[in-house]
Image (cartoon, rainbow, N blue to C red):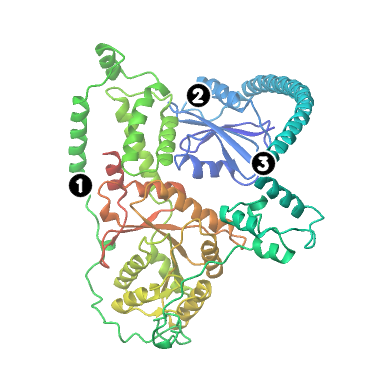
Amino acid sequence: MLEQLLIFTRGGLILWTCKELGKALKGSPIDTLIRSCLLEERSGEVSFNYEAYTLKWTFHNDLGLVFVAVYQRILHLLYVDDLLSMVKESFSEIYDPKRMSYDDFDETFRQLRMEAEARGEELRKVKQVGKVVSSVKKQGQVSKSGLDGGNKSGGGGSKKDVGDGDKDKDKVGSFMTNGNHKMEDDDSDKTNGKENTADNVVLDPSKLMKLRSKGVRGRGGVRKTDSIGNKSSKVAAAEPPKKATKKNRVWDDAAPKQVKLDFTDSVGENGNGNHDHVDIAAADQGESMMDKEEVFSSDDESEDDDDEARSDEKKPEAKKKGWFSSVFQSITGKANLERTDLEPALKALKERLMTKNVAEEIAEKLCESVEASLEGKKLASFTRISSTVQGAMEDALIRILTPRRSIDIMRDVHAAKEQRRPYVVVFVGVNGVGKSTNLAKVAYWLQQHKVSVMMAACDTFRSGAVEQLRTHARRLQIPIFEKGYEKDPAVVAKEAIQEATRNGSDVVLVDTAGRMQDNEPLMRALSKLINLNKPDLVLFVGEALVGNDAVDQLSKFNQKLSDLSNSGTTRLIDGILLTKFDTIDDKVGAALSMVYISGAPVMFVGCGQSYTDLKKLNVKAIVKTLLK
């Protein structure tokens, strides 16, 4: 049963809703569709599920209208797509931008709905008849094969009997031709039968030696000579021989004691150890790049566009239409863009995105979304299809990469300070992406803004992780809370937050162990740390070098955090810290892939090895590089 059908503009103005249906929808499925699908450039998908509802939609791009149908998720309504297309066609005929009320469309919709339901019922009956016919055919084939199988099995039984007789004859022949084999089979039959005892077995030492030299084996891989004898020898023969292991050489007749290697310093109850052996470096290395505005030149952009236009003119293209028709169409404009018109430009754009390290799945979805937003739209005069597609893709990329919520960490830090509690940031990610190094960069940036910071060494798994973080803390003259190795990281983080509350620290930066997204024990430990301590910010640290793996990493991290969460509210990744950005040249697609798959904004970009090499993401520069 259809729950609701709405017509609204792209600006969000609702023009018409079905008053007949008029049922109050649970939750906010329309708002969620707009926020999570249409604004996220996922409009190329077939449907969208929200709790107990399924939503389908279509666009009238030329008029800027959106048509959405809502029905129960458990139902499979076959007429929804036809109904949406008919409503779209009928409503576009009476649409007027100056008109706000469309009460007269109720009767038209009632007729369209009845017609669509009738078509859906006919289609359902046709499908049911097709299923019945196919099931009858399958039953006939099964019964026929069963009869044939019975006849074959009956004939096979007689053949089997004959075959067994022939086998017996062959056995007799073999017994007569080879005396040794006759003796061997007789012995094996006796040993496997019930009459096999130690008294009635006749042993011939000469034959036993010959059989052992030949290495003759019986059933189950056990030597037949070993099966002759009593039960104790049989059990001993069944056990595989133990391989002699090489023993370590012992010098001076003294076995070395295996001592567990642990070079960490003794840690007190408050988590602070003796770090006098670490040299103190100058903490002030200049202003962090986070506080510097990156200049983006529009002149360079216009020059690149001119170069691209000139290169496009030089490229020979296979034109299906004549020269005059193509020129005339570019002047007067095309009536409505069709899918066939958009496919060549979208295909080239998809390949360009993939060369920039965008995941293939993300590039395909983006192109589908752009196609859905342009199909049926009228092409303006003196405008090429390729430039129209590129402009639509540019707008889509800017919408995706622009954060939809505040990423001002300093404001959140001051808000937490007013509540007399520390602001907690947890750094998570896979192995070797630079979590500890970029944690130190964030700490340096916070120090520049007169914020007191404490580090928490919660990577109790990797050897040397505590020492690495301790070195950064000593160089930056920042207190560090550590408990050594083989401790529960969730408990260490909790104690660090308590210590920061007592000492009056403003921010606690929690370093965690690197883990692959498929390592369930470590992911379970991470989920416990997040659920127990409830940090203000969960930062995913990812490399800018990854391509398709970015989708797998982020989606599985979020999935594991959701599945392993014990609390009622699921906590996912809040932001992204992109590392090694200075090593990728123009392959900036990982930023797009990560933001698209997670919905989390890129909050920091690591672009070097010093503490100042941390900056914000320049959305315009990224979009320009992707489309260049």
Determine which residue is flagged by label 3. 24
Q: CA distance from mark 3 to mark 1?
A: 51 Å
Residue 407: image quadrant is bottom left
209 relative to 611, above or below = above
SS class, disc 2: loop
In this rendered view, identify the residue nearer to me: 21 or 254.
254
For the residues labelled 1 and 2, the Cα–Cα distance comes to 43 Å
Front: mark 1 or 2 = 1
Question: In the image, what residue occupies the spot 22% across and 70% down?
Answer: 286
Q: Residues within 10 Å of mark 3 (few under 14, many from 20)?
A: few
| Residue wearing tag 2 | 95
The label number, if any, that marks residue 297 in the structure image:
1
Q: Position of residue 372 (x, y in %)?
A: 45, 30
Viewer-closest of 398 and 176: 176
Instruction: Check residue 3 in the rendering and tell me which mark sits there, or answer none.
Output: none
Camera-near label (2 vs 3) is: 3
Q: Amino acid at mark 2?
A: Tyr
Indicate the position of residue 528 as horizontal and vertical percent values.
Answer: 55, 67
Q: Is residue 338 visible?
A: no
Identify which amino acid the numbered label 3 is placed on.
Ala
- Residue 325 in the figure: left or right of residue 28: left
Position in image of residue 161 (x %, y %): 78, 30
- Compared to residue 41, the image places residue 309 above or below, namely above
Q: Give the mark nearer the N terminus: 3 vs 1.
A: 3
Residues packed near mark 2 inside 10 Å, few (<14), some (14 to 19) or many (20 plus): some
N-terminal of the pair, mark 2 or mark 3, is: 3
Where disc 1 sits, the SS reads loop
Query: Is residue 254 at least partly visible in the picture?
Result: yes
**Amino acid type for the residue under numbered disc 1:** Ser
> Crowdedness of circle 1 by 10 Å Cα count: few (<14), some, many (20+)?
few
